[in-house]
Image (cartoon, rainbow, N blue to C red):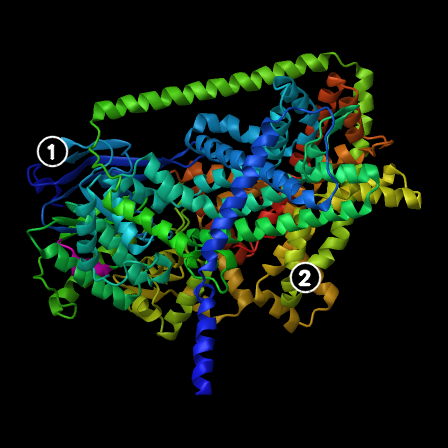
Amino acid sequence: MDVSTATPETAILELKGVQKSFDRGTGKLLRVLEDINLDIRPNEVLCLIGPSGCGKSTIMRIFAGLIEPTKGQVTYRGQRQEGLNENIAIVFQGFALYPWMTVESNVENVLRAKGLDPAEIKERTNHAIQMVGLEGFEEAYPRELSGGMKQRVGMARALSVNPEILFMDEPFSQVDALTAEGLRAEILDIWDDRERNPSSILMVSHDIKEVAFMADRIVVLSANPGRIRTIVENTLPRPRDTRSPEFLRLVDQLHDIITSTELPDIQVSTVTSSVESDIVEPLPSAQYADMLGLLELLDSHGGTCDLFQVVAQTHVPFEKVLTTVKGLEMLELVETPKRSVELTPLGREFVQSGMDERKVIWQKQLLELKLFRVVKELLELREGELSREELIQEIAGRLPMEDPEFTFETIVAWGRFGELFAYHKHRGVLTFE
Amino acid sequence: MFNQIFESVWGQANSLFYPFRRRRYLDLVVVLAGLALLYGLIQLGRQWTGVHRPVVEINLSPWSLPKYTFFSMMRGLAAYAISLAFTLVYAFWAAKDSRAERLLIPLLDILQSIPVLGFMPGLVLALVALFPHSNLGLELAAVIMIFTGQAWNMTFSLYHSFKSVPMELQEAGTVYGFNWWERLKWIELPFGTTGLVWNSMMSMAGGWFFLMITEAFKLGDQDFRLPGLGSYMSVAVEKGNVPAMLYAILAMVIMIVFLDQVIWRPVVVWAQRFRIEDTSQGDAPRSWLLRLLRRSRLIRWMEARRVHRLHVHGPRIPRKKKPVAQAKQIQALQRWIANLALAALMALVLWAAVKLFIYLTAIPGQTWLYLTKAGGLTLSRVLISTALGTLWAVPAGLAIGLSPRLSRIFQPVVQVAASFPAPMLFPIVIAALAHFGVGLNYGCILLMLLGTQWYILFNVIAGAMAIPGDLREAATSFRLSRWQKFKALYLPASFPYLVTGWVTAAGGAWNASIVAEYYDLGTTTLSTFGLGATVSKAAYDRNLTLLAAGVLLMSAIVVIFNRLVWKPCYNLAYTRYSLDK
């Protein structure tokens, strides 16, 4: 929204018109990022949020200089950035600690690589370890520590190099909830000290509450290919109270934005029209077991439920619930007016019948989808035996923005449940059931 | 009063033991061990640089065995040192230079599948010609032969480790500006250590096989034997001295156990810190030696000195970031070196190929037909010996691996048996076969089996131990019969390990065929029709053309067999029968 208001003078790091494609090995390029314009300003916490496959980690790595963009450019303080940016440090999702080094030498070696003299290494190491509250654990090995403690080491290591911008790649997703709460507040305390680095923080996250708690600006991305959907300014005063009405309103608003990104109310119709269009809809990689579970849940709630209530009740990550709902919507088993999920009459019939009837409905609904009809026709054409490679080629041709392997797996899984296809893994062929 | 006297006397006497109680004697042991090693090395130096004698002089007295054992051991260790150096360079090169990788890895694959014993005669002749007046050539030949039995699997292991360093660990290295050396010593080498240590142990065990053969090598009437356990055994056999044979076998076993306790145990314990999985495992391996050494004051003092030196006079010269231009120059230089090395390697491969081709054109079609027939026969022997090994080793391995009690007892025994070089036993077995009137035609299958069955047993035990407890409990709770359990669980679950055992066993059997199908007993020569015998005979007659053709055909059979049979087996094992996913 306000991408253009950032002038080069105020931005530390900036992406201009960045596009990124990855070679999927099949010769086909998979575009993961499209036209990204984004900057990191001094003294801010910038958060990236979006569904899986929106390329949020890729954006972070392009900022860091770990990955080169296919198109567009990265500038650091107005200068074109080449190679790795040396003023940043990364806290990794999987910690990325060296298990054969003690806590202390994990930090020290990073400083050694920078070429500092021993006295300064010692001093900075001690300071970083003390800053994250790891005193007494200097001689411990990472494998002796819990997830939260490991991430503290990751943070100490990153802070020890005194980065101008601290990058964090889903830093708390492998840390238990209570510990994560504490770490978030601590990171903000460290960042809050205006005299010292890090000046800014770039964080990738999939947790809406976390983002609302931490960020000054929240970048919401949409997937396939990754695009910036909108940037939300978060002006709530710090320290933020996660139970205040303003905070909850912001969380709600973010929920709405993400939902409308992923489940637009303007339906791309799946009703068969008289003239067959050649458009194939991408399949969300939803598991049928999750889909069945969600239908049962809706049924026990009288057929309708708020989307976020589902998340709260099932403790399933938000994006996974979204994919599941999307899958059900494609099969016309649910509808999503606004933020609620509702069983359709067909969905109600489905959930209340036995396994055999369910399979009949499922199969019929699958064949309403163009993609499944295409597979069925191909299978008939090949006299009942279709090789995996050929089908993946076909998918890649029809859905150039999707990962064909994922789509293939979804087709197999849904088709198997509907007793439409059978897949023989050893021979790598699809046949009729 | 009495009490007091007793106390004072006891106290005095007790104080005599003080250094022992405080383990001061450990320092003495460390010093003595150092001196013994030094003495041994001086002896070794004399042997290496000594004048080459036409006939080996072996003293069959058991008192000279320690010297021979030491010589043999040092040859094995020297070869290991070369293997390690080779592994580091080759694996690093293959992992870092993607152009070279495309040549290096297939080359390594071929090198590891060809039966290297076939090259021994040529190698020995060449090196002896190079150093005609000293033992150096012969010693080098022995070391190189052992090296060829050790290096390949170590290199493969390290290469795979280099290629599979987790993405985030690498990215962290990049973000925090590690240069190539820091990357190697802080990330890549530690990551590869666990695999390298296990493969080193296997290599060392496999190396003794070649050591025994090279030490006892005679070509026609020329004696190329080297003082060591292998030649001691062969002289003992020639003279029919049974006690000496037993002494030699005992010395070999002691050496294997000694190396395991003194080198490999401590190394395995030390390598624990490089494990990548996060959970600390139930019972970590232990080493009494490492524990004792850590108590030695001498060693602790040396450790302290080292740490002190590092901390106080630290070799840390603050490093300035190199300017971009200079960095570019260095990069260009590196690229040049890589290109040069690749070109040299390609020239070498090409030269070898041309040389081989010239040799082979001299061979008439008739001979090829003869060789192919011999190859078919030897192939069937290799397969029969592998099948026989499987037949007994699978039930035995499962029984041992599934019972904690049995595995505690048998695991060490099997380890020693697997390291024990079978050629040492060949003369005894051949004598027994002759006694029962079995010819070498079938007898050599037994000889092959002798060397290779352990690999199958070893792997099946490992596989059985890796079967998850819940699967076993499930099988028990469904009241599966013994046979049903075997079919439904044990065999499929240990299949990946079994395949590894087969590949190693078959490879070993091919090498063994060269010595087993043609055996020189000193006075008489036993032989049977087969490719191994043909190769040995060609070496004996110095028919280098036939030798080259035989070895090439054998290599080709092994490589083709690997591609057509073992590789699909591996694929099956890692897709269908893998317990990892």
Q: Nearer the viewer, residue B473 or B36?
A: B36
Report whether A418 appears left or right of B422: left
Farthest-out residue, right? B437
Magenta stretch containing residue A212, yes or no? yes
Query: In the rendered image of this protein, does residue A84 appear above or below residue A291?
Result: above
* Chain letter of disc 1 in the image: A
> How far across and down, in percent of the image, does residue B394 sit?
72, 55
- Over which residues does the magenta segment extend? A208-216
Circle 2 sits on which residue? B400
Query: In the rendered image of this protein, does residue B264 appear above or below residue B22?
Result: above
Amino acid carrying mark 1 in the image: Gly
Amino acid carrying mark 2 in the image: Ile
> How far across and down, in percent of the image, does residue B384 sit?
79, 43
User: Are the residues under badges 1 and 2 in a single subunit?
Assistant: no
* Chain letter of disc 2 in the image: B
Q: Residues within 10 Å of mark 2 (few under 14, many from 20)?
A: many
Magenta stretch containing residue B519, yes or no? no
Residue B44: numbered disc: none
Farthest-out residue, bottom? B1
Instruction: Report the Cα–Cα distance between label 1 and label 2.
Output: 69 Å
Q: Residues within 10 Å of mark 1 (few under 14, many from 20)?
A: some
> How far across and down, in percent of the image, does residue B446 sit?
81, 44
Residue B210 sits in which quadrant? Answer: top right
Tell me what residue is drawn at x 44 percent, y 47 percent: A406
Report whether B50 appears left or right of A282: right
Circle 1 sits on which residue? A78
Q: Does the image show residue A66?
A: yes
Q: Secondary structure of the magenta portion, mostly?
A: helix
